[in-house]
Image (spheres, rainbow, N blue to C red):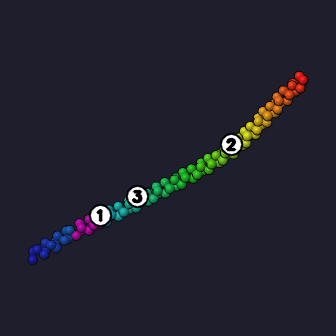
Amino acid sequence: GGRGGEAARMSLEWGPRVRMEQAARTAAEEEREEALASLSRAHATELEQVRVAREEEIAAMREASEEVSAALRQCQAESVELEQRLERTRRAREAETHVHARLAESETQAAALHEE
């Protein structure tokens, strides 16, 4: 059979070519997998950097928040102190007004007694 001989000759020609193509495909797949793995590692590194940066931001915000809280507490303490001083001043003024009124009253009485 002439046909069988032809098929054998074709497989001899095609065999190496098929093997080369398979090898090339395998190499390309391995290259693609390595590229994907590399990309994945780069992505993981980037994510880690973002996570660290965010944690640092949060820590800085907490610190700023604590500073603001401390400043607020100090302002409140000063405000209380000022209110107490205002109250003392108000009472002193009231006492002064009262003394002035009593003094004026006494002077009026003294003048009346003097006229008698």
- The furthest residue to the left: 1
Q: Residues within 10 Å of mark 3 (few under 14, many from 20)?
A: few
Q: Position of residue 58 (x, y in %)?
A: 55, 52
For residue 36, side relative to residue 99 (left or right): left
Residue furthest to the bottom: 1
- Residue 78 visible, this angle: no
Q: Which label sits on residue 39?
A: 3
Res 35 quadrant in image: bottom left
Task: Give the number of marks.
Answer: 3
Q: What secondary structure is the stretch in magenta mostly built from?
A: helix
Residue occupying image coordinates x 29% and y 64%: 25
Q: What residue is rendered at 52% in x and 52% in y?
A: 53
Answer left or right for 59 relative to 115. left
Instruction: Name which of mark 1 and mark 2 comes first in the sequence.
Output: 1
- Dot 1 amino acid type: Ala
The vertical placement of 65 against 90, above or below, is below
Q: Quadrant of the N terminus?
A: bottom left
Residue 103 % position (x, y): 83, 30
Instruction: Looking at the picture, tell me which residue is in the foreground, 75 or 4.
Output: 75
Disc on the earlier residue, 3 or 2: 3
Q: Mark number for residue 79?
A: 2
**Picture quarter with the C terminus:** top right
> Could you tell me how far apart the alpha carbons at marks 3 and 2 are, in whole angstroms?
59 Å
**Whole-percent x, y for residue 7 in the image:** 15, 72
Callout 3: helix, strand or loop? helix
In space, the residues marked 1 and 2 are separated at their CA atoms by 81 Å
User: Where does the magenta region start and end?
Assistant: 15-24
Q: Tell me the tag on residue 10.
A: none
Q: To which quarter of the image does residue 15 belong?
A: bottom left
Magenta segment includes 75: no
